Image (tube, grey):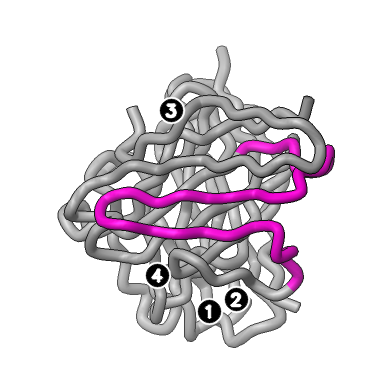
């Protein structure tokens, strides 16, 4: 069974840094892109960026370029999403998802990590 | 505003058939396949339909998808109370070089 397990909820202050994780299991982790998606009540689902675990090649959505960093440690089948300086507007649910290249489908999703940024 | 346009809400009674539309453009729906996701309250999106009309293993055949030009539709027949959820369409966008999503449709079973 394909599983993506994300790290737990976080509550942070504006200006703090944060790194959340997404561990894949039940499949060959390096063969599939990992995509990060943000969900907010007002905007809905937004693609943030993706990473190819085999070589760490990363692509960012223009909306998130420079705002976050996506990385991976293929030795432990884990992808990361990090912020160097959080803003209140980063408050959202964040999902990682596995991408099937052939039909460009996000077929399996993590359970989500709720990030709350508040002073 | 989401790149793909969905009605914010839909409703039906048990046993009815309901359709949810998704409108896009030449750079996304017209050029690439459409996926549909079901999101139950408090859970992650779950793949319901891939490649316009393919059901992953375990998805009942009450759910079906179609695409024509720059639009796609999700149909749910034999509506059940368990179908109450948010439904999202998604597609790759060649201009953005990434995924775009609909704003979601909240389905209520009356």
Res A104 label: 4
Residue name at image x 79 percent, y 42 percent: B15
Mark 1 residue element: helix
Quadrant in the rendering for residue B29: bottom left
Quadrant in the rendering for residue B24: top left
Nearer-N-terminus badge (4/1): 1
Mark 3 lies on residue: A43
Nearer-N-terminus badge (1/3): 3
* Image mark 3: chain: A
Front position in the image: B82 or A25: B82
Q: Looking at the image, is A31 positioned above or below residue A49?
A: below
User: Seen in the image, is B9 located left or right of residue A25?
Assistant: left
Res A77 label: 2
Percent x, y for residue A20? 58, 50
Residue name at image x 46 percent, y 49 percent: B73
Q: CA distance from mark 1 to mark 3?
A: 32 Å
In the rendered structure, which segment of residues is drawn in magenta? B58-86
Percent x, y for residue B35? 47, 59
Q: How many marks overall?
A: 4
Is residue B64 within the magenta segment?
yes
Residue name at image x 27 percent, y 39 percent: A63
Mark 1 lies on residue: A74
Marks 1/2 in contact by CB < 8 Å: the verdict is: yes
């Amino acid at each position: 069974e394909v599983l993506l397990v994300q790290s737990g909820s976080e509550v942070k202050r504006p200006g703090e840094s944060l790194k959340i994780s997404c561990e894949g299991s039940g499949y060959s982790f390096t063969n599939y892109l990992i995509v990060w998606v943000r969900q907010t009540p007002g905007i809905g689902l937004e693609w943030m960026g993706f990473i190819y675990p085999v070589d760490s090649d990363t692509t960012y959505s223009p909306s998130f370029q420079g705002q976050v960093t996506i990385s991976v440690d293929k030795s432990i089948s884990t992808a990361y999403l990090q912020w160097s300086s959080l803003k209140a507007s980063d408050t959202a649910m964040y999902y990682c998802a596995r991408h099937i290249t052939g039909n460009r489908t996000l077929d399996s999703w993590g359970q989500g990590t709720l990030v709350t940024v508040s002073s | 505003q989401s790149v793909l346009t969905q009605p914010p809400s839909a409703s039906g009674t048990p046993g009815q058939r309901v359709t949810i539309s998704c409108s896009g453009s030449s750079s996304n729906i017209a050029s690439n396949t459409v996926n549909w996701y079901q999101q139950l309250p408090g859970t992650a999106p779950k793949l319901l339909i891939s490649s316009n009309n393919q059901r992953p293993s375990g998805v009942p055949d009450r759910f079906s998808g179609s695409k024509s030009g720059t639009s796609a539709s999700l149909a749910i027949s034999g509506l059940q109370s368990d179908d109450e959820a948010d439904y999202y369409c998604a597609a790759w966008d060649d201009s953005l070089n990434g995924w775009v999503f609909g704003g979601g449709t909240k389905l209520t079973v009356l």
